[in-house]
Amino acid sequence: MELWLRDDGTADHDSTEGIDRYWRKNVEKEQDLCVKDGKLYDINGLIGAHIIIRDGQTQSDGIQYIGTADWLLIECETWSMIPLENLIAAREGSHTKIAAVITSPIQAQGAGFALQQGVDALVMSGQHELIEAALSVKSQRYETPPTSVLATEGSGHETLSHLEVVRVENAGLGDRFCLDFLSLLHQNEGVLVGSSSDTLVLVHSETVPSTFVPTRPFRVNAGSPHAYILMADRTTRYLSELVAGDVVQAVNVKGETRDIILGRIKIEQRPMLKISCIAINIDSRKNKKVHVFLQQAETVRLIDSEGAVKSVTELNAGDVVMGRHGSEARHLGVAISSAVEER
């Protein structure tokens, strides 16, 4: 992590040790930077953009530079962690680096370790307490092992995992979300949902014939409003956030995926089941316990380890079902290389 000193006439620190660059009115030396008309320059020319964050729109303006600019210099009109975290999450996998202006010592820690990654540069005036706080964070960053970089998520195929059911219990009444799509789903195809964004259960479409009700091959009874669902762009959303026109990822028992468009959501109060599972790694070791809430109905089905559909009303402890188990945390649905625990 770099430290940038803003030359605004307030300098009362007599040492340049630990300072990597200097933000001045004009670029004269190799370490100098300057801002003109919203653009960031060094001695070699244009290297990025300067964005003043005032609201959601100016945050979006900053995000537009990610992937194209080398540096994004962020200055918050009212300093806040939320836009900083959103920008750090958005730049995941990009070459763009983020520099954040801080105006108090406590902000150094927040910016330096936001989402367990932190910004790539702290920018401060020459006040002694600001520089000392920034130097302390820089030292801590060198001592902290970097978080692992996420593997690039591909498209067209999903690696499915096995989840062992450990308990099925009544959960009372809840709002149940049925998702109706513009495309017909197939046998052994559904969507990935769950209460934990890194471990999702494959919920089967209503394509299985029943004596009591006709099939609804365009529908997945996906569960409760707080549940995550995997979208076509590999982000997650809460079921409660979905609107008609959203594009969801459908996946079959082979892990083959396709994009399907949401046409309607039906929300009704229904008796719910809490299905608790343990994710099983490929080396057969059991680890994280997860759960999903689904309607207590014979037409709501999961897919077992043999590829057969099984109603949630027939599930028992020890059954193994299909799902997706990853290691990535998420911020606003975007995969990030930070640790987040969801229970």
Image (cartoon, helix red, strand yellow):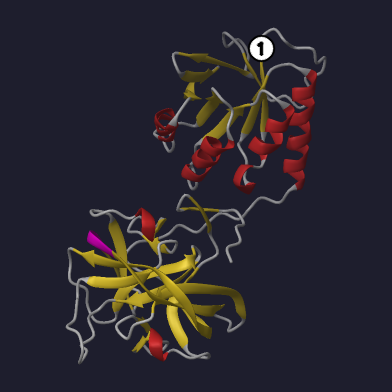
Badge 1 amino acid: Asp
**Horizontally, is 293 left or right of 73 in the view?**
left
Residue 44 shows in this picture: no
What residue lies at 52% left-to-right and 91% top-to-bottom?
A: 318
Q: Is residue 261 magenta?
A: yes
Could you classify mark 1 by the number of other residues whose Cα lies within 10 Å: few (under 14), some (14-19), or many (20 or more)? some
The span picked out in magenta is 260-266
Which element type, helix, strand or loop, lies under badge 1?
A: loop
Residue on which disc 1 sits:
7
Q: In the rendered image of this protein, does residue 275 appear above or below residue 122?
A: below
**In-image side of 190 versus 318 (left or right):** left
In this view, the residue in front, 266 or 124, is 266
Determine which quarter of the picture holds residue 230.
bottom left
**Residue at 81% of width from left, 18% of height from top?**
15
Q: Locate residue 106: give its quadrant.
A: top right
Which of these two is toward me, 45 or 95?
95
Q: Left of 229 or right of it: where is 335?
A: right
**Residue at the far right in the pictured view:** 14
The quadrant of the picture occupied by the C terminus is bottom right
Q: Which secondary structure type mostly characterizes the magenta part of the structure?
A: strand
Foreground: 202 or 270?
270
- Depth check: 20 or 81 in front? 81
Q: Residue at x 79, y 23 (%)?
A: 129
Q: Position of residue 222 (x, y in %)?
A: 35, 70
Q: Position of residue 53 (x, y in %)?
A: 49, 26
- Is residue 53 found inside the magenta-colored segment of the image? no
Residue 174 % position (x, y): 41, 69
Q: Note whether 178 is above or below 25 in the view shown.
A: below
How many numbered marks have been drawn onto this rendered protein structure? 1
Quarter the N terminus occupies: top right
Q: For the point 74% across and 28% down, which residue is it? A: 105
Residue 39 appears in view = yes
